[in-house]
Amino acid sequence: MSKPKIVIAGAGYGGLITTVKLQKLIGADEASITLVNKHDYHYQTTWLHENAAGTRHHDQTRIAIKDVIDAKKVNFVQDTVTKIKPDEKKLVMENGELSYDYLVVGLGFEPANFGIEGLLDHAYIIRSINSSRLIREHIEHNFAVYNNEKEKKEERLNIVIGGGGFTGIEFAGELAERVPKLCKEYDIDRDKVRVIVVEAGASVMMGFDPQLVEYALNSLESRGIEFQTNAFLKEVTADSIVYEKAGERHTVKTNTTVWAAGVKGNSILEESGFDVNRGKVMVTEDLRDPNHDDIFIVGDCAAIMNEETGKPFPPTAQIATQMGFNCAQNLKALIRKESNTQKFVPEIKGTLASLGGGDAMGVVMGKKLFGKPANVMKKASDNRYLYQLGGVGLVLKKGKFNIFG
C-alpha cells in the first residue's frame, strides 16, 4: 500500500510551521510530504516594514527553507501555485502538477483596494521581500534626486501611508527613525520631509486599548509623523493622492504612497471554486474546508470566528503559527487513523507593536507595556518564533538581540 501524499502549498507562517512540526511528528515511512513555495526562502512578514523603511536588511528577514526542513522527510518544490483541483485531488503549478491525499493551503494574502482609483497602479504595497526592497530603493532614489534638480519637487519628500493599522503604524515608526538619517546623508532639511498616515477610522489602530493608542500617537508625532483620521483615500496617482475628510477633498503631492490598509485571501481559492468571503474560507473547527475534508486551510486564507466578538479573528502571524501546530497534529491523527482531530482554539498571548527606535507598546498576558519593556518583549516574541521554527541555531543566525534599539 502506497504512503499517503501530503502536499503543503505555501511556506508562510502557517504552511512552514505545519511542515516543520509534521516532519517531527511522523516517520518518513508513514507519509510523503511535499512543500511547494514560489521562493526557496520563507520570510518574516511582520518584519517587512523594517525592510521597506531601510532599518533592517532583507537578508535578515528571509530564511532559507533548506535550513529548517529535513530533506530526508520533506520534498521541497520551488514553483508557483496557479490552481487547485479539489475533485481531482491535484495542485496545479506553473511547471507541473502534484496529486495529494491531503492538501494544506497556506498561500497568503493579496491587497484589498476597496475600489480606490489608481491604487493598484500607483501605490506600493508591503507584501514580500521584493516589494519591500522596492519601497526602500524608491524612497532613497527620491531623496537622492531631490537636490539634483533645479526645480525642487515636494512630492519627492512626501511619503503617504494609507492605513493606520499595525503595518501602517509600524512602518511609520521605522520611517521616523530612518528619515533623519536619509536627510543627513542627502543634505536635506528634515522639516522639508513629510510622513503622513491617512486613516479612514476615527483613530489609528482601531479596537486597540485607547491608552496604548495615545502613547503610540504621542511617540510618533513627537518624531514628525502626521496623522489624518476620518480621512478616506479616494485616488492615487503617480505624483499625488486625494483624500476626503468632513466632506472636503484634499490633495497631497507625493511620489510615494504605501498602502497598508487591507488584505484578502489568495484569489487562487476563489478561482478554484472554493466558497470564500474576501478570499478567505470559513474553515471547520479543525481547520478544514467545509466541502473537502482532505483540504486544510491555514494563515491568511482561513477565517475563524471569534465567538466573543462575533467577528473573524484578525490575520496575524501569531494565529497562523498556532494553526500550523494544530494542522500538523491533525494530519498526524489522520495518517495514523486516530479517533479524533483537535479543535483549533486560538490562544492570544498578547499583541505588541513596534514604534521604531527601540520604542513599542502593547499587551502581554493582560498587562499593558510601554516603551523599552514593550520593545524587549516584542523582540523576545520575534526570537521565540525563530526558535519554534529552527531552534537555537536559527535564533543566533537571524534573531534580534539589540533590545534597546
Image (cartoon, rainbow, N blue to C red):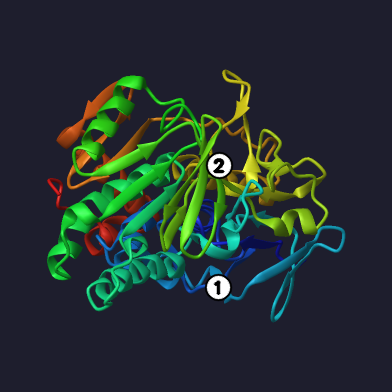
Q: What amino acid is labelled 1 in the image?
A: Phe
**Residue found at x 42% / y 66%:** 129
Query: Measured from the top left, where is residue 159 in percent x and y?
Result: 36, 55
**Does residue 13 appear in this view?**
no
Relative depth, front residue between 259 and 76:
259
Query: Measured from the top left, where is residue 280 in percent x and y?
Result: 68, 45
> Which dot marks residue 99?
none
Can you identify the residue that label 1 sits on? 76
**Residue found at x 25% / y 45%:** 379
Res 348 → quadrant? top left
Can you identify the residue that label 2 sits on? 326
Element on which disc 1 rests: strand
Sequence-wise, the earlier of marks 2 and 1 is: 1
Relative depth, front residue between 236 and 30:
236
Relative depth, front residue between 185 and 231:
231
Res 397 → quadrant? bottom left
